[in-house]
Amino acid sequence: EPCIDVKDTACVDVCPVDCIHPTKTEPDFEKENKLYIDPEECIDCGACEPVCPVEAIFEEAAAPDKWKHFTRIDADWYKNRKG
């Protein structure tokens, strides 16, 4: 599964709009098992795709069917976080 238990932050480092969380400095980083992309903030620039060591990031339309549900998981994580 994409990013699960990897949490390599290369994507965080290259994101120009800071839409990938939690970062290593945030309290949630240790308890979460993946990083989340905020679909409301992401500008679809693609900077994160080539730096992902586990090839877990795709344009939404190009995501494999078996991983498309992660878009909703990420959106829900941000919705719950923003309360």
Image (cartoon, rainbow, N blue to C red):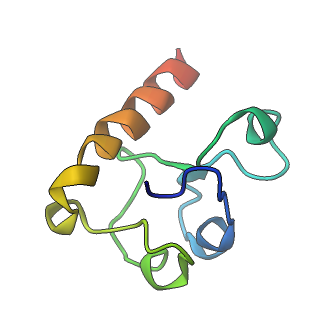
Residue at 49% across / 74% down in the picture?
48
Which quarter shows the N terminus?
A: bottom left
User: In this rendering, would 61 be left or right of 21?
Assistant: left
Examine the rendered structure and indicate whether residue 45 appears above or below residue 66.
below
User: In this rendering, would 26 be left or right of 18?
Assistant: right
Residue 65: give x, y in percent of width and height. Answer: 16, 54
Examine the rendered structure and indicate whether residue 31 appears above or below residue 16.
above
Examine the image and state in which quarter residue 81 appears. top right
Examine the image and state in which quarter residue 18 appears. bottom right
User: In this rendering, would 37 be left or right of 12?
Assistant: left
Residue 8: give x, y in percent of width and height. Answer: 68, 66
Residue at 80% across / 39% down in the picture?
30
Please state the total of marks drawn on the protein image: 0
Residue 46: give x, y in percent of width and height. Answer: 38, 77
Examine the rendered structure and indicate whether residue 10 appears above or below residue 37.
below
Which one is nearer the viewer's eye here, 43 or 1?
1
Residue 38: give x, y in percent of width and height. Answer: 44, 46
Residue at 76% across / 42% down in the picture?
29
Which one is nearer the viewer's eye here, 21 or 5?
5
Examine the image and state in which quarter residue 75 appears. top left
Residue at 43% across / 66% down in the picture?
56
Task: Name the outermost residue toward the top.
Answer: 83
